Amino acid sequence: MSYSIRMTKEEKDIAENYAKINNISLAEAFKRALFDRIEDEYDMKVFAEYEEEKAKGNVKTYSHEEVWKELGL
């Protein structure tokens, strides 16, 4: 499957230079950027959900000492 992306010459030059510097194809550069962004947004969503649950008092946290004691270390 292929896609077409419209860019200005300046954007194209930046993208091509980035790919060249990182020794990857332009397609790989775009693919990595897309999936990095998806992963970042997913992480932020999960963190926001965690913070919301923590604020409601639904999250139990443990200190390092408590974890080590529980594991017998």
Image (cartoon, helix red, strand yellow):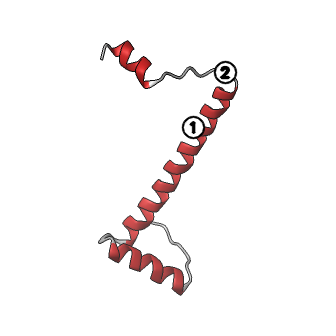
Residue at left offset 36%, top offset 19%: 68
Residue type for callout 1:
Val
Secondary element at tag 1: helix
Residue 3 location, x and y as percent? 48, 67
Q: Image quadrant of residue 71?
A: top left
Give the numbered dot on residue 4.
none
Residue at the image point whose x is 40% and y is 74% from the top? 18
Q: Which residue corresponds to the image point at 40% horizontal and 79% vertical from the top-left?
A: 17
- Which residue has dot 1 on it? 46
Vertical placement of 41 versus 6: above or below?
A: above
Asked whether 1 or 21 is in front, the reply is 21
For the point 56% across and 49% down, which residue is it? Answer: 41
Instruction: Identify the residue position indicated by label 2 in the image.
Output: 57
Amino acid type for the residue under numbered disc 2: Gly
x then y, percent, for residue 38: 52, 51
For the C terminus, give its image quadrant: top left
